[in-house]
Amino acid sequence: MTTPPKPPQPDPRLFNADLAPAPERKWGTYSIFALWMSDTHAISNYAFAASLFVLGLPAWEVFLALLTGISIVYVLMNRMGHAGHRTGVPYPVLARASWGVYGANIPALLRAIMAVAWYGIQTWLASTAVVLLTLQLAPGLDAYNHNSVLGLSTLGWIAFMVMWGLQAVLLTRGMEFIRKVQDFATGPVVWLVVLALAVYLVVKAGGDISLTRSITGLSGPAQLEQSLIAVSLTVATFLTLVLNYADFARFTPDHRSYRRGNLIGLPVNFTAFAVVAVLVTAGTISVFGEAIYDPVKVIQKIDNPVVTVIGALAFIVATIGINVVANFVSPAYDFANLAPKYLDFKRGGMITAVLAIVVMPWKLYSSALVIQYFLGALGAFLGPLVAILLVDYYLVRSGRIDVDALFSADAEGAYFYRKGFNPKAVIAFLPAAAVSAVLALVPVFDAVAPFSWIFGMALSGALYVLVSGRDRAAAGAGPIPEDIIPSQVRAAVGEEPGAPEGSGVIAAPVPAKGS
């Protein structure tokens, strides 16, 4: 009787339990919906929808533009979700197929740098709500709000570190704990507050709110231009999460879960949230005599201590929600991918949290130059990065990925390429990123700046298809498979004695239901 060959062992330079194919798949439809509630119920998304109305777009046109943009996002999320669900691996590991087992650190670090900056900025913005709440409850502490230590007052530092500590406690508990918190807290609570605001202002306005007229008299051609810009900026805003959506889709039990969760959470929920934002903003015109598109300022205008406290708490929770989804999970995996032997998800997350203090986000946010050129340039890279991942998965490989080879540093491995780097990805990325950055940042191209990601995505995708011609022919054509890809590596590690419970190691999965 012959002994079956021993399955390949993952290379410790590329593998740990958090980077392994998902051990459990508990993120059902509601969890994905709650994920999007946590992300879309941000003050920035509220203000974006409201600002379009203030700019002069009729309310119905705001809804149509945002629905169009978020529907494009929905399609992209489903495409990336398919890859994440089938492979069961996070974004930096999935990127090894197109960039190489070591080259994947390039797109992972670009995503991580952006996330660290915004993680710090969002934490600081939430801390300003903590300051507001503190002064409402204890006005005598205002004396500690007028000095400056590295750009923040004493009270500001205390509030910032309180927010930092609250998030650290939440974020170091792992993905399953994050799922439970967002399911019942970060998304629903904001809905309750903004709906209450909308009802209050509509009643106070006596129903005198128009959804069909432009409050600035914006002309037809100008309305069309602003609508197209709104569509494009909506997509651009969500490209960060399109890029690393595998981090979440890997935990879904079947294809229906992420597709339905995406449908309810994006086109339905995002547009509904925009409707409420515009209703509140229209209400402020009738009630307060001015258009106020910052919900925190609306709460302050009501001038009721109870309303202020509840509103501040709600938006603190909302900011934690968006920080978890958009700015923490990805860099936690990205940093873990740098040195899996030493860094896991929790340690990668703590690196993210510590760096968020080091960059002094209040200084980043107060500098228009930094926001425009540093974060703007990084944002211009998102389109090309998304295109390379999607083109590689759908057009080059037709969905056929060897999950075990993603954890192999063997020079003959499928994704080792040249010393662990795929030069074809670099060739496709660099010129596309350069074009996208120039269009986004050089003043002479201001007219097309909001659409720079489209040029970057199209160019990088076309270049990657062009340089990957032979690889595409070798992969073969045919329908994209639907079943979860089994992993001998995962099964082999699961059989090793002493494997820690919950280490990310289970037997090869069964095919996905509802494919």
Image (cartoon, rainbow, N blue to C red):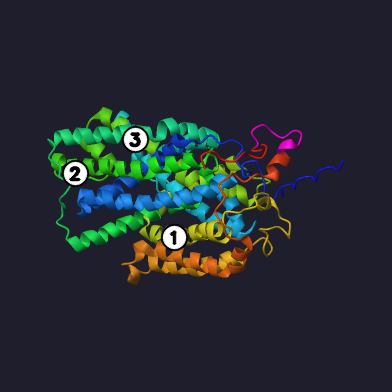
Identify whether 153 is placed above or below 392: above
Give the Cα separation between the discs numbered 2 and 3: 19 Å
Q: Position of residue 410 (x, y in %)?
A: 73, 56
Mark in the foreground, 1 or 3: 3
Residue bearing mark 1: 374
In the rendered structure, which disc, 1 or 3, sits on the residue that comes first in sequence?
3
Residue at the extreme bottom: 444
Which residue is located at x 49 percent, y 53 percent?
243
Amino acid of disc 1:
Phe
Which residue is located at x 52 percent, y 65 percent?
429
Q: Which residues are magenta?
A: 494-503
Q: Nearer the viewer, residue 187 or 131?
A: 187
Amino acid of disc 2:
Ala
Q: Secondary structure at mark 2?
A: helix
Q: Position of residue 355 (x, y in %)?
A: 52, 48
Q: Position of residue 183 (x, y in %)?
A: 44, 32
Identify whether 322 is placed above or below 310: below
Left or right: 1 in relation to 56: right
Q: Secondary structure at mark 3?
A: helix
Residue bearing mark 3: 190
Amino acid of disc 3:
Val
Residue bearing mark 2: 282
Kindly indicate whether the residue at mark 3 contacts the one at mark 2 (C-beta within 8 angstroms).
Answer: no
Give the Cα separation between the discs numbered 2 and 1: 35 Å
Give the Cα separation between the discs numbered 1 and 3: 31 Å
Is residue 495 part of the magenta span, yes or no? Answer: yes
Magenta: main secondary structure equals: loop
Kindly indicate whether the residue at mark 1 contacts the one at mark 2 (C-beta within 8 angstroms).
Answer: no
Q: Position of residue 449 (x, y in %)?
A: 35, 64
